[in-house]
Image (cartoon, rainbow, N blue to C red):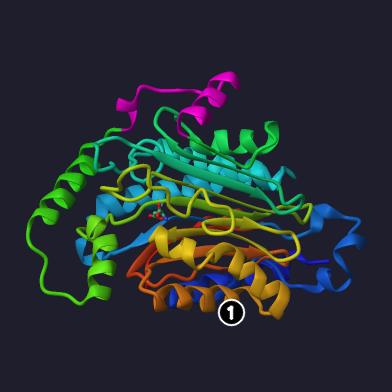
């Protein structure tokens, strides 16, 4: 069993390590209970639990952040962590915590999910989301939503109340209507800041790009759309380990500024942007979706643990290296069944935070 003292010690260690590096490995609790085997746990209340969230990775630099803005991010991320904690602390299920935190972040204009989503090239908002249950390997996902206020709620309904995994566009919204999910006027998602980002992206497309090789041109055309300021990304995600020892993950996004023609990124793709398996880990990603799909990031982390016996932090880092190798940037959060968690990223910052049994939210933004 994990004594309170040892939990605290691990939590303190996690805090110190996290401050030192975005690539560090952390834990919510020591592992003695695992040695006796998960199935023999007769006192679930004493099990460790942990909750980790992200609010997107990108060019997030201290020098370009105002104190007010930084505080707003920290406050909202802390609120989301506390919402997850409330659920987990009373013995609630992993996915209830994931949904509680993500709906809060979707409702905040600070993040590229729900209200505050980025704009497509056509000036619309098209939202993607997914959720996965590590116990059953059930999953639900939605893509290209224009009127669903909280896409994560619909993703969960796809998982729990339909025989399908992924629903898109109008069909997904008919399903939403049938299930009584809140629909809003598309104007609800508008924020001036995101609108201006679209205008900047379009202006930049008009100015002639510098001479580049074919490879560079390909990489540039994917990145140009959103390479303009510190708010490059802003997708939100959550992963968790609950007191019953179950893992779960969820992700929600507006995608990438200036995306075209029904483009769908990694966030609603099970195995790419989101994955959870009680045998390994739960993962939620953020970054250049095309690269995360090609590297099948979330499942790759799990596979490295399952087939290669790697610890979570190593698996996460090596997967992210593969993303970088083909030109992708971003990050991920992951947690395993022992309560170890990792939050690697290869951008200058990633909004991220964690909360464990002691109930204290920890939020980080920059690399240092
Ligand atoms: N991965 C998301 C996408 O490509 C964007 C992000 O994480 O910021 O749609």
Q: Measuring 53% from the left and 63% from the top, which residue is drawn there?
A: 333
Residue 52 can be seen in this image? no
- In magenta, the rendered stretch is 169-189
Magenta segment, principal secondary structure?
A: helix
Q: Measuring 53% from the left and 59% from the top, which residue is drawn there?
A: 272
Q: Is residue 308 above or below residue 46?
A: below
Nearest the viewer among 113 and 31 is: 113
Total numbered circles: 1
Residue 300: give x, y in percent of width and height. Answer: 59, 69
Residue 122: give x, y in percent of width and height. Answer: 24, 38
Q: Ligand 1 is found in which quarter of the picture?
A: bottom left
Secondary structure found at label 1: helix
Residue 303: give x, y in percent of width and height. Answer: 66, 70
Q: Is residue 8 above or below residue 80?
A: below
Left or right of 5 on screen, residue 249: left
Left or right of 195 on screen, residue 302: right
Nearest the viewer among 297 and 135 is: 297
Residue 52: give x, y in percent of width and height. Answer: 56, 57
**Mark 1 vs ligand 1: CB under 8 Å?**
no
Residue corresponding to mark 1: 314
Nearest the viewer among 125 and 69 is: 125
Which quadrant, please, contains the N terminus? Answer: bottom right
Q: Measuring 21% from the left and 58% from the top, which residue is drawn there?
A: 229
Residue 228 can be seen in this image? yes
Q: Measuring 83% from the left and 68% from the top, which residue is drawn there?
A: 33
The quarter of the displayed image where residue 291 is located: bottom left
């Amino acid at each position: 069993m994990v004594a309170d003292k040892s939990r605290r010690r691990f939590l303190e260690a996690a805090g110190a390590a996290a401050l030192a590096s975005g690539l560090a490995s952390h834990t919510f609790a020591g592992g003695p209970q695992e040695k006796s085997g998960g199935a023999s746990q007769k006192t679930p209340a004493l099990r460790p639990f942990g909750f980790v969230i992200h609010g997107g990775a990108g060019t997030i630099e201290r020098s370009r952040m105002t104190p007010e803005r930084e505080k707003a991010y920290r406050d909202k991320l802390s609120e989301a962590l506390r919402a997850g904690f409330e659920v987990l602390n009373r013995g609630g299920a992993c996915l209830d915590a994931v949904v509680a935190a993500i709906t809060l972040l979707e409702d905040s204009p600070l993040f590229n999910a729900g209200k505050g989503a980025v704009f497509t090239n056509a000036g619309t908002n098209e939202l993607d989301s997914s959720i996965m249950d590590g116990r059953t390997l059930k999953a639900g996902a939605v893509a290209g939503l224009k009127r669903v206020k909280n896409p994560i709620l619909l993703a969960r309904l796809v998982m729990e109340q339909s025989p399908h995994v992924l629903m898109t566009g109008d069909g997904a919204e008919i399903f939403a209507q049938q299930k009584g999910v809140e629909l809003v006027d598309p104007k609800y998602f508008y924020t001036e800041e995101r609108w201006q980002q679209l205008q900047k992206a379009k202006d930049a497309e008009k100015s002639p790009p510098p001479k580049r090789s074919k490879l560079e041109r390909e990489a540039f055309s994917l990145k140009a759309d959103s390479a303009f300021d510190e708010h490059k990304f802003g997708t939100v995600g959550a992963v968790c380990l609950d007191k019953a020892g179950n893992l779960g993950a969820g992700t929600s996004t507006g995608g990438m500024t200036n995306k075209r023609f029904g483009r769908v990124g990694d966030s609603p793709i099970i195995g790419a942007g989101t994955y959870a398996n009680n045998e390994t880990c739960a993962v939620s990603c953020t970054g250049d979706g095309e690269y995360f799909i090609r590297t099948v990031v979330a499942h790759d982390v799990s596979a490295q643990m399952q087939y290669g016996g790697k610890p979570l932090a190593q698996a996460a880092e090596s997967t992210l290296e593969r993303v970088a190798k083909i030109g992708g940037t971003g990050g991920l959060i992951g947690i395993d069944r022992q309560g170890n968690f990792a939050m690697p990223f290869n951008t200058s910052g990633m909004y991220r935070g964690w909360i464990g049994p002691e109930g204290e939210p920890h939020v980080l933004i920059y690399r240092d």
